[in-house]
Amino acid sequence: MAAAMAHRTELSPPPALASFETPALFLDFDGTLVDIADEPDAIVVPEDLADFLVDLDERFGGRVAIVTGRSREDIERHLGRVPVCMAGSHGAAIFAADGTAVGDPALMIPDEAKERMKAFATSQGLLFEDKPHGAGLHYRAKPEMIDACVAFAEELAEEHGLAVKRGKQVIELVAPGADKGSAVKRLLEGAPFAGATPIFLGDDVTDEDGFAACAKHGGFGILVGEQKETAARYHIEDVEKVRRWLTA
C-alpha cells in the first residue's frame, strides 16, 4: 500500500540541485525520465539517456539510483547496461552500480497467480505484463474496466498472500514488502548513499512511498506531471523539465 499522503496540492518548483551539499537522487523511470506511453514497450527513450545517467551519477559521486516498477532486465532492454544503482520491480530487487545484488530479493509471485491474471487480461481484451517479481494488468485501452480490474487483482492477491500496486491505468501484483520506500531506506543504509540528502522524483502513486521515505530521512519528494494530493514537497511539470533541473 502506498504511504499516507500529506495534504499538498499546490507545489512550487524545487530549489536548484546545486544548492544541496550532498544530494542523493532516486529517479522513477516512466513519467519521470521518459514520457508515459500507451503500452510499456511503446516508450520513446532519448538516445542520450544512458550517457546522461552515467554523467549524472559521476557528478554526484555514485549517489543516483533508478527506482522503478520495471524489472532491471526490462530497463536494460531500453537503455542497455547502465552502471548506476537500480531498484527494480518496485524495490523487490535492488542492485549496486556494478550489478551485484543489494540485500535479499523479494520472493517471486506464484505462477498460478500470473496465469490467472494473464487469462483475465486475455478474456477482457487488456494487456498483461509478466515481470520477474510480479505481474501487471494494463487497462489504458479500456479505462472503464478499472473497478473490475481492481476487484480481480485484490481477490487474487488475498488468495495468494500478495500485495497490489496501483499506477497510471495499471494494477500490479507483487510480493509483500516490495515498495519504493523500502528500496530508498535500504540504499540509504550503505555507501555511497548514507548521510546524503535523499531526493525522490516520480509521477505516480507508487512513488508516494519513495517521497515519504525521503522525507523521513531528511530529504523530500518532487512530483512530476499533474499536480495532485501528494507527500512530495515540490513539483516539476514534465520529463523535459526534469532533465533541465538535473543539469542546471
Image (spheres, helix red, strand yellow):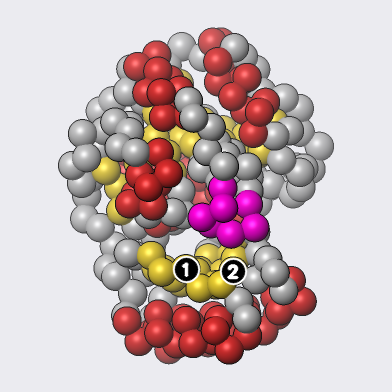
Foreground: 56 or 12? Answer: 56
Inter-mark Cα distance, 1 to 2: 8 Å
Residue 13 spot, x, y in % from top left: 72, 25
Helix, strand or loop at mark 1: strand
Q: Tags 1 and 2 in contact by the CB under 8 Å rule?
A: yes
Residue 240 spot, x, y in % from top left: 66, 28
Q: Which mark is residue 129?
A: 1
Residue at horizontal 49%, vertical 30%?
Answer: 47
* Magenta residue check for 71: no
Relative to 110, does residue 108 appear above or below in the rendering?
Answer: above
* Magenta residue check for 39: yes
Q: Is residue 89 left or right of residue 148?
A: left
Q: Amino acid at mark 1?
A: Glu
Helix, strand or loop at mark 2: strand
Residue 133 spot, x, y in % from top left: 34, 65
Foreground: 199 or 172? Answer: 172
Relative to 208, does residue 160 appear above or below in the rendering?
Answer: below
The residue furthest right is 10
Q: Which mark is residue 138?
A: 2
Q: Which mark is residue 107?
A: none
Residue 151 visible in the shown view? no
Relative to 77, does residue 112 appear above or below in the rendering?
Answer: below
Q: Which residues are magenta?
A: 37-43
The C terminus - image quarter? top right
Q: How many C-alpha atoms fall within 10 Å of the one at disc 2: few (<14), some, or many (≥20)?
A: many
